Amino acid sequence: MHTKKVIIVDDEPIILAGLENWLSRDYKILGHGSAQTFLEAFQQFDFKDGLPTCILLDLQMPGMNGIELQASIKAINAEIPIIFMSGNAQQADIINAWRGGAVDFILKPFTPAQVTEVLEKQFSVIQNYPENKHQSAIKPLIDIPITKREAEVLLLLGNGQQQIEVAQTLGISIRTVKMYRSNLKEKLGLDSLADLAKYCNQHERSIEAIAKN
């Protein structure tokens, strides 16, 4: 009997079927081919069965996309960790996903091992949730080894601005912005846009404190 549950929402039948086949060996699976069918069936899902649950959500779908479904889930106060999947994500989409509360991001094409690794990482986090997990807490400030200007650049990039827009906002050259971006990559290990957006979302208060000093 499975002790963990995964809900898959993806409009590509081959990917949906593949994920269901791969993951059904280890998890209870609920699969949906669109955001709309997921929402229609939502009331039938038994989220009180005691099973830790994660959602694998395709970012780009016709009709209601992944970001819009994420917002709908949040609006009805369903606190279920969402792992986004995408093969062609745009910068704004990635940032919106993180800021909306996504817990991870998987790029297509992926392997069964990659999906399982991300799921198990999140299920491990769920098992360590405190009893008051639904109560929001203010995260303490942390020490981040960046300068005031690097913090300003990080905040702007993390909020979806392109490098040329950052340059215009701060009144500096795009070459200087690229230099700061390179510094952030070296100091914080932010190799991709997804890494940068996630880091900024997780530590926004600490970054803002540096930018204001």
Image (cartoon, rainbow, N blue to C red):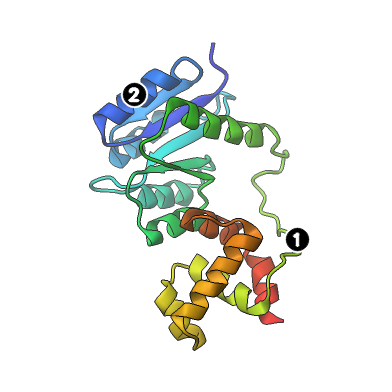
Residue 83 place in picture, x, y as percent = 47, 41
**Alpha-carbon span between mark 2 and mark 1:** 41 Å
Instruction: Classify 42 as above or below 65.
Output: above
Residue 140 — which label? 1
Q: Quadrant of residue 33?
A: top left
Residue displayed at 69% across by 75% down: 210
Q: Amino acid at mark 1?
A: Pro
Helix, strand or loop under label 2: helix
Which residue sits at x=71%, y=58%? 139
Apparent side of residue 64 relative to residue 133 in the rendered image (left or right): left
Camera-nearest residue between 103 and 88:
88
Q: Which corner quadrant holds the N terminus?
A: top right
Name the residue at 45% across, 79% down. 174
Please name the residue that numbered disc 2 is placed on: 18
Q: Residue at x 34, y 36 (%)?
A: 38
Judge whether 199 appears above or below 57 on screen. below
Kind of residue indicated by mark 2: Gly
Q: Is residue 102 left or right of residue 33?
A: right
Residue in front for this viewpoint, 78 or 162: 162
